[in-house]
Amino acid sequence: MTSETTTEHKPTIGATGRKIIYDEDGKPCRSCNTLLDFQMATGKLPISSSSSSKQPPKTIPTPVSNLIEDEYKQDPPDVELLGRSSWTFIHSLCAKYPTQPSNEDKEQISSFFKMLGRMYPCDWCAKDFTKYLQENKLDNSSNEGLNMWLCGAHNAVNKKIGKKEFDCQLWKKRWKDGWD
Ligand code: FAD
């Protein structure tokens, strides 16, 4: 056990070096942690000294999906898979937002982002996203405006978690027209 763990089965820092998030019932939150950290918190991955040095552990278990033939029997997504899939959906949805939206379009896209800030399954991500929405007014006036706003919102998350920021001038190539 390392100094960063409370009990053998309730580590506070995961194998990736991130803080482990627990739900209100005390169970590790699946959609708030990386798979590696979740496995560590649920005791499926030994808590080793590598977790205290914030390096990935030497023994990384074979991905469960490789062992299961039935492709339906996959585990629920971790924070990264959930995030990647969600951004794909959100950017794709916004890429099709009208150039000249009606009042109904504007209301519905505003409700969508408000809902996302309330119900996104990673609750600490959702709280930060709501804060971003409050501090950075959603631009629902046009397709370009919405997508530039979204790029900024995504970049705020990238920055927060130490990822490279995306060049927003390229949003259309990435999410609408393609690169050629
Ligand atoms: P992603 O960030 O998932 O991006 C997918 C693809 O989108 C990239 O490959 C790139 O081609 C493109 N892209 C990247 N940035 C932009 C941009 N600015 N504009 C347009 N396209 C872009 N994770 C956390 O750990 N903490 C959080 O607080 C958190 N909050 C989140 C909030 C929301 C609303 C969502 C949807 C996800 C959140 N995530 C959070 C997940 C996180 O943003 C990533 O999805 C996850 O870390 C996986 O990252 P990735 O490297 O696969 O790329």
Image: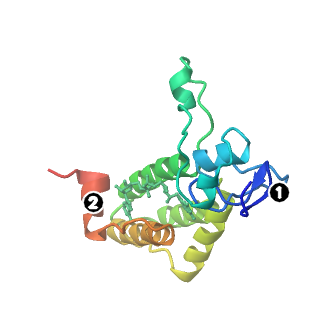
Q: In the rendered structure, are the residues bearing label 2 and label 1 in contact, judged by CB atoms less than 8 Å apart?
A: no
Q: Residue furthest right?
A: 25
Q: Nearer the viewer, mark 2 or mark 1?
A: 1
- Check disc 1 and report its element: helix, strand or loop: loop
**Which percent across, then down, holds residue 10?**
78, 53
**Which percent across, then down, holds residue 169?**
26, 69
Residue at 32%, 54% in the rendered image: 175
Residue at 83%, 57% in the rendered image: 24
Residue 71 visible to an observer of this rendering? no
Name the disc covering residue 123, or none: none
Q: How many marks?
A: 2
- Check disc 2 and report its element: helix, strand or loop: helix
User: Crowdedness of circle 2 by 10 Å Cα count: few (<14), some, many (20+)?
Assistant: some
Residue 177 visible to an observer of this rendering? yes
Please say if 160 is above or below 83.
below
**Which percent across, then down, holds residue 34?**
58, 50
Work out whether residue 52 or residue 177 is closer to the camera in this orientation and state it: 52
The residue where tag 2 is placed is 172
Callout 2 amino acid: Lys
Query: In the rendered image, which quarter contains the N terminus?
Result: bottom right
The residue where tag 1 is placed is 24
Callout 1 amino acid: Glu
Q: CA distance from mark 2 to mark 1?
A: 40 Å
Residue at 33%, 66% in the rendered image: 166
Work out whether residue 111 or residue 100 is closer to the camera in this orientation and state it: 111
**Is the shortest distance between ligand 1 and the CB of mark 1 under 8 Å?**
no
Q: Residue furthest left?
A: 180
**Which percent across, then down, holds residue 38?**
66, 47
Residue at 48%, 62% in the rendered image: 105
Please say if 42 is above or below 66.
below
